Image (spheres, rainbow, N blue to C red):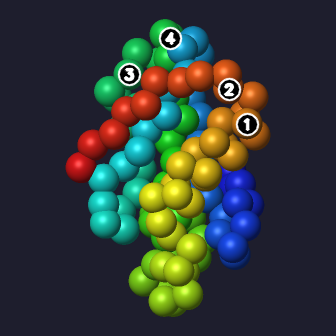
């Protein structure tokens, strides 16, 4: 699924499981989430959300496609994107998981 977050960016995300909400942030630069990220969780206890960050993975546009895509790709944008996704999904709070 995609979430339009403005500045010409659409974020790819998907969910699996049920229970405590958890958000996975992938390493980088430029990578994205993989199905194997689900293997890190017991999906009977966690509802896991995979998010490809701005410019990465299946999100659009890719940072490698245009320099303009990098202008609106900052830490502040990432935090705002996470909050927009949380609100969109109706999640009150979630566990944050990241790796690189």
Alpha-carbon span between mark 3 and mark 4: 9 Å
Percent x, y for residue 57? 46, 63
Residue 14 pos. (x, y %): 59, 42
Q: Residue at 24% of width from left, 49% of height from top?
A: 100
- Rendering quarter of residue 56: bottom left
Residue that badge 4 annotates: 44
Q: What element does badge 4 sit on?
A: loop
Of badges 3 and 2, nearer the viewer stands 2
Give residue 9's mark: none
Where is residue 79 shown, x and y percent of the image? 54, 49
- The residue under label 3 is 41
Residue depicted at 43% across the width and 31% down the height: 96
Q: Is residue 37 left or right of residue 61?
A: left
Q: Are marks 4 and 1 in contact (CB under 8 Å)?
A: no
Query: Which of these two is toward me, 2 or 6?
Result: 6
The residue carrying pointer 3 sits among few (fewer than 14), some (14 to 19) or many (20 or more) residues within 10 Å by Cα, namely some
Give the Cα separation between the discs numbered 1 and 3.
23 Å
Please determine whether, in this image, residue 19 is positioned above or below residue 89.
Answer: above
Give the labeled residue for mark 1: 87
Left or right of 35? Residue 62 is right
Mark 4 vs mark 2, foreground winner is 2
Residue 72 appears in view: yes
Tell me whether circle 2 and circle 1 mark residues in contact (CB < 8 Å): yes
Q: Quick check: 24 left or right of 54?
A: left
Q: Earlier in the sequence, mark 3 or mark 2?
A: 3
Q: Position of residue 29 (x, y in %)?
A: 31, 66
Q: Give the mark toward the camera: 4 or 1.
A: 1
Residue found farthest to the left: 100
Q: Secondary structure at mark 2?
A: loop
Q: Nearer the viewer, mark 1 or mark 3?
A: 1
Q: Residues within 10 Å of mark 2 (few under 14, many from 20)?
A: few
On the image, numbered disc 2 is attached to which residue? Answer: 91
């Amino acid at each position: 699924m995609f979430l339009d977050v403005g500045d010409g960016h659409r974020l790819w995300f998907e969910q699996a499981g049920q229970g405590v909400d958890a958000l996975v942030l992938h390493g980088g630069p430029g990578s994205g989430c993989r199905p194997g990220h689900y293997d890190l969780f017991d999906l009977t206890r966690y509802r896991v959300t995979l998010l490809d960050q701005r410019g990465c993975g299946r999100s659009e546009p890719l940072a490698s496609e245009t320099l303009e895509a990098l202008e609106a790709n900052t830490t502040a944008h990432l935090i705002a994107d996470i909050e927009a996704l949380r609100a969109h999904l109706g999640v009150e709070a979630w566990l944050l998981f990241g790796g690189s």
